[in-house]
Image (cartoon, coloured by chain):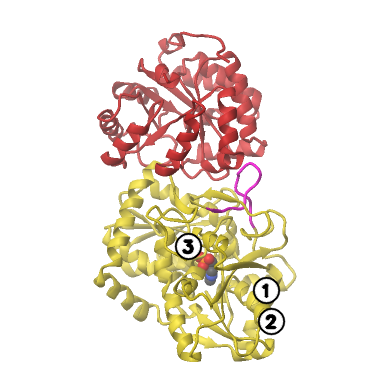
């Protein structure tokens, strides 16, 4: 299986935005996804809102809460993904905690995922055996399970995780929750170097990436930068004004060099 | 029956470790330190010394004669965990874990608290060992347990209010986990119940089992036989598993765990995780029964007692329930309030509202038993912290 996610990140200088699905509403969320695709996103992480996001900082917690208050559930997230993928060819990775997926049903999710243009799943609180079970089920449906690694991950674990990994490796830049930080930690580069010993898969760095210099810095040693809270904060700031897409656009103008927009995908149009 | 978890911390299908990758190594480190402590006589000697000289153990097993007479059924013995230093069983676990934290070289402790009893116990052991202490507490619980907040502050802890979600225990745990994952280098997470990712449920059980070990010896000495029934309230499940565990192999001893029935049977009105419609899920690091909505979001819960007001339950209890070894039932807010007053009047013992749930269950169970039978009820804590809230409720207001 040639993984579309891997393909899209191979060239380096990759950009992986994260947004909470359907925040602030389905239409604006779709508009933002289209914008991200147009701005050269190589993969999009779509967050499934959950009541108890223990790995997230306040910005993503609040966006999750907003989405839940608007009645967003996995069914709506899937249909947003499907609408987006009907016109754009950017791989989508669902970013979720385990419980909403379990409740929905892993079988049912596997069956819907491909149909909705979902290429991968990243489950924050599934590691080791729990991840392995999930990966086996997803594999039958050609959906990748993306693995997270952290500065605390030992070499022994890294080797095992990398051996089973698919798509790309998500390297968490520092021990902590999602959210803005002053600079990219030295730990991140060390971690990516360690990861490279065990895999040729692309490596993306995320958590706290909120400025142009963070992105440029990450591109020096990793294949892609993940930007989450910084985008979600713009969406939050726009609540009530309907100018979320415009705000996200101006953030991206600051965050990404211009040529990133040109570096879109070879295949435009739908694969669905 | 086998009551030990497997090497991944599973009792049957319950338990395990559902955490972000960043926490795996710290949990491994904790697991190693815990396992090493189990075979270390120095550790045991120090813990025993503290339990005895600092907390006042063994706690009494008291025959509640007037209560038994009034009910006219089984003889009721009370395991007096309320007599511990700081007023509840929570100190047993805190003393064990603080010794581990010190061995691991951690200098800063974070803890969550619901009723405030675990927070007080954590703040206490931090004072004793001169360690910095941050306690996360839901703002709704802060309102209900004001006095305990002040108590923690007196003990030198910093109490941080949590305004997310339902503003109760679950939200405090999320915040404590976030703190821990951010500060793993110097910070130890002192989790207060038999919950969370492996090895916490096993570790908390180990440190709370002193309750059951003492009770077993005490009841044998008092009556010459094992009890017919054990009763304990179940929030996360630490006082209950502490009492039950040393009796699990005694097949003739029945056991009942009592959940908070709250004010009704609708989702959001209670914290009875095992009640009708119970569903298995994953919350805060462990697979167990979880009160949740159709989309897998964690449901709001309600109980007059903050310590029982939690949407999930320790994984070992889930296993004991599914295997039928332990029965689980619930009592309502009103029944617990009645029991609170009943024990105060008949025995001169004001129980915590959490423990009042166990008393209320005992009232019903004992009445159906005979005077040659014995029941041991765990009085997990004293009710001083609840006196003000109960006064307000009895005066006709809400909590
Ligand atoms: C006195 C008392 N009993 C019981 C509980 C419930 O916890 P657990 O089920 O872990 O014993 C608490 C929790 O705060 C408590 O303070």
Rendering colour (chain B) = yellow
Residue at 49% from the left image edge and 32% from the top image edge: A138
Q: Estimate how packed mark 1 is, as few (under 14), some (14 to 19) or many (20 or more) residues with alpha carbons within 10 Å.
A: some
Q: Is residue A117 magenta?
A: no
Residue at 53% from the left image edge and 64% from the top image edge: B320
Labels 3 and 2 positioned on one and the same chain: yes
Magenta stretch? B288-301
Eyeballing the image, is B330 above or below A9?
below
The residue indicated by pointer 2 is: B368
Circle 1 or circle 2, nearest the eye: 2
Q: Can residue A41 be seen by looking at this rendering?
A: yes
- Is disc 1 in contact with disc 2, using a CB cutoff of under 8 Å? no
Helix, strand or loop at disc 3? loop
Q: Estimate how packed mark 3 is, as few (under 14), some (14 to 19) or many (20 or more) residues with alpha carbons within 10 Å.
A: many
Q: CA distance from mark 3 to mark 2?
A: 31 Å
Direction from residue B145 to residue A152 in the image, left or right: left
Where residue B51 appears, as percent x and y from the top left, is 37, 77
Helix, strand or loop at disc 1? helix
């Amino acid at each position: 299986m040639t993984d579309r996610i891997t393909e899209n990140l191979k060239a380096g200088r990759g950009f992986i935005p994260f947004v909470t699905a359907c925040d602030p509403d389905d239409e604006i969320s779709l508009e933002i996804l289209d914008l991200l695709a147009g701005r050269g996103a190589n993969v999009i992480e779509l967050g499934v809102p959950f009541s108890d996001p223990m790995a997230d900082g306040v910005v993503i917690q609040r966006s999750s809460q907003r989405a839940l208050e608007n009645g967003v559930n996995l069914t709506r997230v899937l249909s947003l993904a499907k609408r987006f993928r009907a016109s754009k060819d950017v791989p989508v990775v669902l970013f979720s905690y385990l419980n909403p997926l379990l409740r929905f049903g892993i079988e049912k999710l596997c069956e819907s995922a491909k149909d909705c243009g979902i290429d991968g799943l990243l489950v924050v609180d599934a590691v080791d055996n729990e991840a392995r079970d999930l990966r086996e089920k997803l594999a039958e449906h050609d959906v990748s399970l993306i693995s997270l690694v952290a500065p605390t991950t030992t070499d022994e674990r890294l080797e095992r995780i990398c051996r089973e990994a698919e798509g790309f490796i998500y390297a968490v830049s520092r021990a902590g929750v999602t959210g803005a930080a002053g600079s990219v930690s030295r730990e991140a580069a060390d971690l990516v170097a360690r990861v490279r010993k065990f895999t040729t898969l692309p490596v993306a760095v995320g958590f706290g990436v909120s400025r142009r210099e963070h992105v440029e810095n990450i591109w020096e040693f990793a294949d892609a930068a993940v930007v989450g809270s910084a985008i979600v904060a713009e969406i939050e700031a726009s609540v009530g004004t309907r100018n979320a897409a415009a705000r996200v656009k101006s953030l991206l103008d600051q965050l990404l060099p211009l040529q990133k927009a040109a570096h879109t995908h070879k295949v435009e149009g739908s694969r669905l | 029956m086998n009551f030990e978890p497997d090497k991944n911390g599973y009792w049957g299908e319950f338990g395990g470790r559902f955490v972000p990758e960043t926490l795996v190594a710290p949990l491994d480190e904790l697991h190693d330190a815990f396992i090493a402590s189990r075979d270390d006589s120095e550790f045991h000697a120090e813990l025993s010394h503290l339990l005895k000289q600092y907390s006042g153990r063994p706690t009494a097993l008291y025959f509640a004669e007037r209560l038994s007479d009034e009910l006219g059924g089984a003889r009721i013995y009370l395991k007096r965990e309320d007599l511990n230093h700081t007023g509840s069983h929570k100190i047993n676990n805190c003393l064990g874990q603080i010794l581990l934290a010190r061995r691991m070289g951690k200098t800063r402790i974070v803890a969550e608290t619901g009723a405030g009893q675990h927070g007080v116990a954590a703040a206490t052991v931090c004072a004793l060992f001169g360690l910095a202490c941050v306690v996360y507490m839901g703002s709704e619980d802060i309102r209900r347990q004001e006095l305990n907040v002040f108590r923690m502050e007196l003990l030198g802890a910093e109490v941080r209010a949590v305004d997310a979600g339902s503003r109760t225990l679950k939200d405090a745990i999320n915040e404590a986990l976030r703190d821990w994952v951010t500060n793993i280098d110097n910070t130890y997470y002192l989790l207060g119940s038999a919950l969370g990712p492996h090895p916490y449920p096993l570790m908390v059980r180990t440190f709370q089992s002193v309750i059951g070990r003492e009770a077993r010896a005490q009841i044998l000495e008092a009556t010459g036989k094992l009890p017919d029934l054990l009763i304990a309230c179940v929030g996360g499940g630490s006082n209950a598993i502490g009492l039950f565990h040393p009796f699990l192999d005694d097949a003739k001893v029945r056991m009942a765990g009592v959940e908070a029935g709250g004010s009704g049977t609708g989702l959001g009105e209670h914290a009875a995780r095992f009640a009708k419609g119970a569903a298995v899920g994953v919350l805060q690091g462990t697979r167990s029964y979880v009160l949740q909505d159709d989309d897998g979001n964690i449901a709001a819960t309600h109980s007059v007692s903050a310590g029982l007001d939690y949407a999930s339950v320790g994984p070992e209890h889930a296993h004991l329930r599914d295997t039928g070894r332990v029965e689980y039932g619930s009592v309502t807010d009103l029944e617990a309030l009645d029991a609170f007053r009943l024990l105060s009047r008949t025995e001169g013992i004001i129980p915590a509202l959490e423990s009042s749930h166990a008393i209320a269950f005992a009232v019903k169970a004992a009445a159906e038993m005979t005077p040659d039978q014995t029941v041991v009820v765990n009085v997990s804590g004293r009710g001083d912290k609840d006196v003000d809230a109960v006064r307000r409720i009895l005066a006709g207001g809400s909590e």
